[in-house]
Image (cartoon, rainbow, N blue to C red):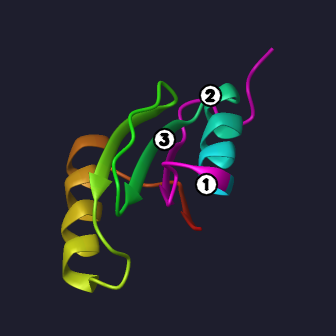
Amino acid sequence: MKKKFQGKIVVITGASRGIGLAIAQALSLEGAVVYDISRTIVPHDEIKKSYSADVNDYHKISQILEEIKSTEEKIDVFINN
């Protein structure tokens, strides 16, 4: 059976813990490739790569998103948690 998010690239802010981590875990189980942007990096198996940044820093967030797109070609889902 095909997973709902198979092969989809998902970026979640605040996925290092709490609700953001729960979202990352659920989407990962459904086949998504998950990236995290958080102030604190906490490694989790469900997250392909974590980036340290404050979401208020527009330029840093833009740089991170460009880096992800250069690797993955596109971002399918962005969750601002």
Question: Amino acid under label 2?
Answer: Gly
Q: Residues within 10 Å of mark 1 (few under 14, many from 20)?
A: some
Nearer the N terminus, badge 1 or badge 2?
1
What is the magenta segment's predominant secondary structure?
A: loop
Q: For residue 53, which quarter of the picture?
A: bottom left
Residue 4 image position (x, y, % from top left)? 75, 34
Number of other residues with Cα within 10 Å of mark 3, as a class: few under 14, some 14 to 19, many 20 or more = many
Magenta-tinted stretch: 1-18
Do the residues under discs 1 and 3 have CB atoms within 8 angstroms?
no
Count of marks, rendered view: 3
Q: Position of residue 78 (x, y in %)?
A: 53, 63
Quarter holding the C terminus? bottom right
Tag 1: residue type?
Gly
Spot occupied by residue 67 in the image (x, y as percentages of width and height): 20, 55
Q: Which mark is residue 69?
A: none
Q: Quadrant of residue 79?
A: bottom right
Q: Badge 2 is on which residue?
A: 31
The mark lying in front, picked from 1 and 2, is: 1
Residue under label 1: 20
Q: Residue at x 52, y 52 (%)?
A: 15
Alpha carbons under labels 1 and 3: distance apart? 11 Å
Label 3: state its secondary structure.
Answer: strand
Image side of residue 23 versus residue 70, left or right: right
Q: Residue furthest top?
A: 1
Residue assigned mark 3: 34
Q: Secondary structure beneath disc 1?
A: helix
Instruction: Tell me whether circle 3 and circle 2 mark residues in contact (CB < 8 Å).
Output: no
Distance of label 3 from label 2 (alpha carbons) = 9 Å
Sequence-first disc among 1 and 3: 1
